[in-house]
């Protein structure tokens, strides 16, 4: 089968999902009201609550949720074959991520822009907020550790990407200064920044940067991990306007260019798919596809992290309630397209089946080198457009690193916020101290990255991926549970949220039990303890939610503002 046919099929499925299902959700389930006064206007402050054009907001939302995860997950899951991976991405995006991302955005807009944790407290009870915060803290902890390891692996495998990434930072700082201190329009500086970045990609191929293979007993990847976590801690302390926001502007353009080039390369080159649709010859040690597929591919199918973004930042900028369909559902669709691109790159980016099977020769190899397979495969697509392979792979690795690093310093910033919120909940002001919180976040991330896999400290942290995916999906299931309770109270078709909630909940709980069993068998006390604690927190919150069904609670703000 040719890759262009799969790409075209995915486009058709996503188009139909947006055209029909999202319209049903908007008109019949959420009943979006064009006259509803959104928090962006009701609480406008020029900082967090800012009415934003839906196209601009969609771009910001998309780049916030689209990181390295929808690339890493599908690249690893390809060990089971491209058929299951593609089916889960299409089904998950249309029927699960769509209502999750759209629904959490709508629920937050109807509740003064509050986060899902606060809404859970209102709907379920006061303990729900603390439970939600703890689960989110562990999710962010794993996000930071996994992405630091992913960046370290890319820097080691593709040293040409090192210089472009680090020189992107001063470019972003200059853009932040011009936009926020000199009142320049953002469009021109961000386009110039993108052009400079593309030039640096070519320069990087001429001047690759590598660390020694081993220093003080640790491999190069481990040192890159330590460097990236140090950078993340520092960047998380900087004002968002100085680095995070201007770099997001550049990365938004970078992502759109990347996706366009990858799919254009597929349709121009029409490479054949060499990977099996269903891999019947799995390497020894490969975990069962059911249920692990549904947590290996989290972002790109359904992701609890999206609910944090929808209710954390996006809801505060929604200009009209009717824009929630475009921003929320189409944002999920955009990430689905990125996941499909990862599937195509790892299914058709190899010249022969033997090359593919050699790369996916073991579960450990698939986990640690899946992202490298994406970079090589997507780079081969760009070759069909006349771009030299070394430049193409540098560009693709630079794109993955840029988004993983953005998620890294955002994740460390959010982790610090979570510690502060927990401190306020339990009257522990020390956790609200920015210096103390930053140090605690840094230490916890380094500990997890270096000790998650005792046999390969600092370099084997991708062993965390199943645990990260499971925690991410559990968070999505909890958000869907809250959404179900809200719809039940409003006497609407809550089954559209409950069915995905039950599916995700069962698959992720099953996966977590398998993960814990594997960690116990390996004698990994750290991951056994973390996995067990997350499972207990999740079960506790679900039981609180079941009890809330009888109480029929709902956020007061939603009741006061009507059902519109």
Image (cartoon, grey):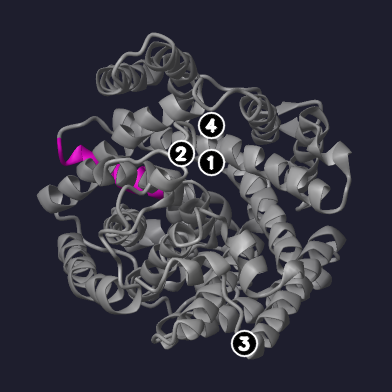
395 and 157: which is toward the camera: 395
What element does badge 3 sit on? helix
Q: Which residue is mark 3?
A: 549
Q: Are marks 3 and 4 in contact (CB under 8 Å)?
A: no
Badge nearest the viewer, 3 or 2: 3
User: Which of pointers 2 and 4 lies earlier in the amino acid sequence?
Assistant: 4
Query: CA–CA distance between discs 3 and 4?
Result: 49 Å
Quadrant location of the C terminus in the rendered image: bottom left
Quadrant location of the N terminus in the rendered image: bottom left
Q: Which residue is mark 4?
A: 155
Residue at (71% x, 40% y) in the render: 416
Please identify the dominant SS of the magenta region. Answer: helix
User: Which of pointers 3 and 4 lies earlier in the amino acid sequence?
Assistant: 4
What element does badge 1 sit on? helix
Query: CA–CA distance between discs 2 and 4?
Result: 14 Å
Q: Are marks 2 and 4 in contact (CB under 8 Å)?
A: no
Residue furthest to the top: 182
Compared to residue 104, the image places residue 65 above or below, namely: above
């Amino acid at each position: 089968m040719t890759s262009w046919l799969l790409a075209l099929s995915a486009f058709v499925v996503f188009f139909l999902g947006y055209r029909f299902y999202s319209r049903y959700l908007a008109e019949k389930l959420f009943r979006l009201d064009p006259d509803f006064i959104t928090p962006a206007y009701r609480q406008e402050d020029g900082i967090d609550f800012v009415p934003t054009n839906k196209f601009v907001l969609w771009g910001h939302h998309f780049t916030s949720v689209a990181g390295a995860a929808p690339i890493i997950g599908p690249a690893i899951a390809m060990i089971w074959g491209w058929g299951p991976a593609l089916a889960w991405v299409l089904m998950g995006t249309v029927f699960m991520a769509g209502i999750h991302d759209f629904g959490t955005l709508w629920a937050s807009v109807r509740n003064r822009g509050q986060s899902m944790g606060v809404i859970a407290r209102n709907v379920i009870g006061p303990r729900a907020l603390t439970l939600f915060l703890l689960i989110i803290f562990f999710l962010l902890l794993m996000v930071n550790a996994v992405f630091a390891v992913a960046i370290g692996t890319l820097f080691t495998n593709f040293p040409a990407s090192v210089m472009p990434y680090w020189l992107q930072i001063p470019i972003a700082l200059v853009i932040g200064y011009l936009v926020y201190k000199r009142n320049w329009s953002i469009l021109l500086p961000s386009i110039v920044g993108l052009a400079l970045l593309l030039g640096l990609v070519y320069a990087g191929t001429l001047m690759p940067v590598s660390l020694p293979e081993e220093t003080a007993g640790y491999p190069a990847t481990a040192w890159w991990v330590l460097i990236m976590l140090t950078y993340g801690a520092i960047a998380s302390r900087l004002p968002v306007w100085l680095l995070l926001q201007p770099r997001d502007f550049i990365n938004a353009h970078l992502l759109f260019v990347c996706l366009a080039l990858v799919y254009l390369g597929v349709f121009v080159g029409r490479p054949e798919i060499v990977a099996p649709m269903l891999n019947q010859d799995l390497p020894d040690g490969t975990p069962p596809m059911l249920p692990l597929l549904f947590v290996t591919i989290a972002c790109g199918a359904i992701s609890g992290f999206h609910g944090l973004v929808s209710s954390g930042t996006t809801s505060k900028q929604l200009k009209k309630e009717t824009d929630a369909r475009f921003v929320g559902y189409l944002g999920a669709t955009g990430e689905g397209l990125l996941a499909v691109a990862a599937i195509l790159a790892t299914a058709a980016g190899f010249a022969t089946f033997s090359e593919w099977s050699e790369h996916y020769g073991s579960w450990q190899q698939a986990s640690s080198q899946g992202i490298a397979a994406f970079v090589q495969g997507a780079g081969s697509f760009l070759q069909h457009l006349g771009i030299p392979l070394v430049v193409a792979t540098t560009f693709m690795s630079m794109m993955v690193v840029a988004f993983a690093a953005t998620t890294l310093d955002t994740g460390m910033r959010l982790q610090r916020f979570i510690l502060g919120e927990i401190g306020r909940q339990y009257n522990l002001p020390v956790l609200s101290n920015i210096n103390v919180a930053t140090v605690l976040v840094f230490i916890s991330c380094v500990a997890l990255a270096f000790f998650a896999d005792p046999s390969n400290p600092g370099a084997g942290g991708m062993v965390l991926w199943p645990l990260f995916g499971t925690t991410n999906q559990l968070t999505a299931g909890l958000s869907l549970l809250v959404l179900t309770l809200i719809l039940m109270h409003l006497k609407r078709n809550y089954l559209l949220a409950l069915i995905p909630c039950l599916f995700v909940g069962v698959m992720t709980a099953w996966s977590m039990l398998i993960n814990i069993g594997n960690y116990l068998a390996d004698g990994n006390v750290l991951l056994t303890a973390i996995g067990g604690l997350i499972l207990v927190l999740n079960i506790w919150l679900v039981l609180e939610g079941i009890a809330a069904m009888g109480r029929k609670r709902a956020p007061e703000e939603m009741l006061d503002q009507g059902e519109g």
